[in-house]
Amino acid sequence: MLTSLDHHQLLVFWVQLLVLYAAARILGEVARRINLPSVVGQLCAGLLLGPSVFGVVWPGGFDWFLPGQPYAEQQSAMLLSVSWFSAAFLLVVAGFETDLDLIRRLGRAAALVTVGSLAVPFAGGVVAGWLMPDSFYGQIDGTSPSRLVFTLFIAVSVAVSALAVVAKILGDLGLMRRDVGQITIAVGMANDVIGWIILGVIAGLAASGELSAIDIGFTIIGLGLFLVGALTFGQRGVDMALRYVRRDGRNLQGALTVTLATMLVFGVITQGLGVEAVLGSFVAGVILAKSRYQQIESQHLIEDLTAVLFAPLFFATAGLRLDLSLLQGSALAWALVLLFVAVVFKFFGSWAGARWAGLTSREGFVLGAGLNARGALEIIIATVGLSLGVFNQTSFTIIVMIPLVTSLLASIGLRVFSKDLEGSVAERERLAREEALSRNLLIRNSRILLPSASDTNSIVAAQIVHFAWPEELAATVMAVSKNGGGPDMTVLENVLYGRELDVATLDHVDVVDEAKQIVAQSKLGYGVIAVGAVAEPGRGTFVSPLVDELLKTSDLPVVIVRTARNLPGALPGIFAQALVPVVASPSSRAAQELAANLSGRLGTRLTLSHVVYQPPDDRPDIGRRLLDRIRSGGTAVEVGAEPTMVAGNERAELDVAERVLAQAHAHALEVSANADTEIRFANRPAVEIVSQAVEIDADLIVLGARLRRLDDGRPSLGPNVEYVLEHASQTVVAVVTPDGRPD
């Protein structure tokens, strides 16, 4: 039955939240400004508001802020409930950033570091715990606990790491996506899992006086089944739920509902298994991030909310538990001994495991520093030990002090050892790809949708996509019925070989229904639609009947591929030379991304061309002479017998052209593309583009188009793009961005 709280209790609770949050945010910002992770300031906020400082400076105010009996139990329960809820969000966010495929590739290193990081400090903790005097023991039913139980509590408390704290520090320092960061997360997860199991074992031993093999087996087997089930049936269930809420397009509230429900369900399961709910929250974050139907906006919202609200509350509450006034005399000496064991043995064990796995000493130092961070688990171990009577208040304070100091040392050590850490060549290449993807407008980390009738245009569209998009991005082919029969997917599967591929066959329906089905599918987490056009549009069509319908209704970018006319074979040879018309628009930037990635993969030579509009003139070479004159530093151009001064607007147009081409060329170099630049002058840019493609012997034209829908619903790509699609003999790729997309 729920028990009502009186007005005073509620007032104290809200004041606690306000003061903790304000102090954590302020000190977290101070820490960030002095180049420390914000978690350090947030932990210090709790320390300042706890008995060590606030309780000494203003005892009366402290007794009101953290009251004793008869309100202590209820007030503590409310505050700690908020802390646990905040920890669940921290672990969900850590799960978002965890890449299981990357960890699998780094599995040997993660396993060996786990062994070293746990075994070495655990052994040191056993020795230290065994030597500690009885004055640190609590009381179990009026008698002191056995030395074995006390020693095991001490050993596990100095051995394990805190996944939530490690993840927060790594995130603050921008190390989450580094190889060493992912190994640290994997090892931190293993530390948490093993720590919970050991805690369950020794807590049972303390409570009953004997080990229960049945309870231990139940926990281990249950946890294993949970992890397997979460990665299989759980993943499918999450996919189904996220797909359902996206059936009508982006649905932020639906995605948040699924995310929070998954976090709570997984938390309930792990709590029921005897392993704390926060581990279930972490697994939930991993599963949600792996789903193809996840909406990235919901992840960003939870990440922002956690950074702004839940992380400060969690770490400030953890700092409240520390009472430094108890650390005097022998208590202080033993506190320093345990701190030494926790820091040095953990660092050495992690470093030794890293070196055993073949990592560099620098990477071993980063792992040793990162895994030294402690937090919720150590505090829980101390709390369980105190509640069972294994620890007294002094030993409890020593154990709670360790996470605060080690987290501070870990944040400083990580910053020092990770500075200018280059990593392997493969890691640097991966990080560069991820950075480029994060800045891209078109080629981003999202699935690709390929409507296909298995004709030449569809096959070439698949070729373009396969070589322009990273291979780790999955694709879905929606097989469009043709003449009542399903298309042969063999060629497309060969073209897309090595890429995760789903195939869905559309029923034999009219083109409007086919377009509706494709658009409905596109709302389920895709980033682009790539489709082949017909070489010769029929009467009453713009590109082709299906493409026209897609352009009318799709909110995603559409890559239209129209193959070269009179193609000698079923497929084109490798594209050797591509013309990329460049202007200062988002759609042109999207086309540049596609062309540059294609060049980086295939070696295609790119000509990045900007056509400056030149009014009709009897002297067709004036533009070229003007450009040459300006580049040579002159201010006038000789035309016939009379000098013509360079007008200000002409110079401005050339400045714009050169800046646009410079940006395009710089982007091409980022992805190792081969590119030249050229400025042209013409009063009909589309005609000039077609002519230039012939002059440079291009076999591919890639250009961007901003889609506009006319009042009658018909799509329009603008006269220049439409002219090139109609008149160019080369393969043409038009990257169409919908009207109204943000620049």
Image: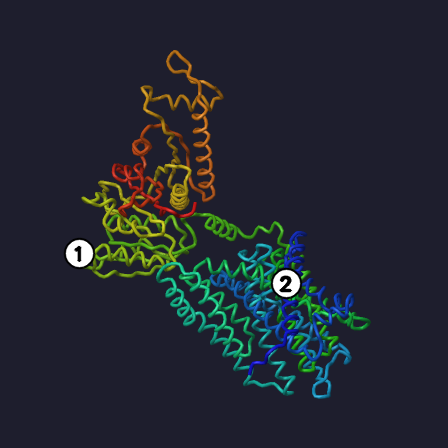
Quick one: 695 or 68, which is closer to the camera? Answer: 68
Residue 568 showing in the rendered view: yes
The three-letter code of the residue at mark 2 reads Tyr
At which x and y percent is residue 474? 38, 57
At which x and y percent is residue 519? 31, 56
Q: Which residue is under mark 1?
A: 483
Side of 536 where 443 appears, left or right = right
Quick one: 72 or 108, which is closer to the camera? Answer: 72
At which x and y percent is residue 413? 66, 57
Residue 348 showing in the rendered view: no
Identify the mark at residue 21; answer none if there is no mark. Answer: 2
Side of 255 where 93 appears, left or right = right
For disc 2, the neighbor class at 10 Å (few under 14, some 14 to 19, many from 20) is: many
- Please name the residue shown 78% across and 68% down the image: 56
Instruction: Report the quarter where the N terminus lies.
Output: bottom right
Side of 58 where 23 appears, left or right = left
Q: Residue furthest right?
A: 329
